[in-house]
Image: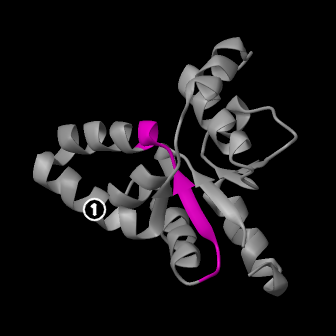
Amino acid sequence: MKIIFVDSDIILDLIAKRDPFYTAAAKFFTYIDKSDFSAVTSPVVISNIFYILQKLKGRDFALKNIRKLRVLLGIITIDEKIIDLALASDIKDFEDAIQLYTAKQNNIEFLITRNVKDYSDKDINIMTAEEFNKIVESAADFL
């Protein structure tokens, strides 16, 4: 089973229906729902999504959508080793460093984000939802 880490921007593209990214995010989550992929994220992502959705559409909307999201996404832990790795990292965005090291420490194969340029790691496949969708569509055995 392929494990995929999903960053907050992809989730927000789906829930907030942000154009022009909504279509790729919706297709990505359809693949997650209908395949043998296992999608995960971190508590930091969930917290950030809640905060942003609450600001945009209110607390009830945020809670309702995070509950729906939990059907598709597992939550993996962040520990002090991950924080220490992120602190020692050259990655400019501290949150991105946390996400990368969370994924790496959990042996995750793919990190899906719109901020591909912010990551420079060769140990994990970092791509956009659109790029991931194209790989899935072009390789039947990928599923």
Residue at the disc numbered 1: 67
Relative to 87, is 142 on the left or the right? Answer: right
Residue at 71 percent of width and 40 percent of height: 105
Residue at 51 percent of width and 78 percent of height: 33
User: Can you say which quadrant of the picture contains the C terminus?
Assistant: bottom right
User: Can you say which quadrant of the picture contains the N terminus?
Assistant: bottom right
- Residue toward you, 134 or 70: 70
Residue 47 shown in magenta: no
- Residue toward you, 59 or 80: 80
Q: Position of residue 63 (x, y in %)?
A: 20, 54
Q: Position of residue 6 (x, y in %)?
A: 56, 52
Relative to 101, is 12 on the left or the right? Answer: left
Classify residue 28 by image quadrant.
Answer: bottom right
Q: Residue furthest right?
A: 122
Q: Amino acid at mark 1?
A: Arg
Q: Position of residue 107 (x, y in %)?
A: 75, 50
Relative to 136, is 10 on the left or the right? Answer: left
Classify residue 22 by image quadrant.
Answer: bottom left
Whether residue 91 can be seen here: yes
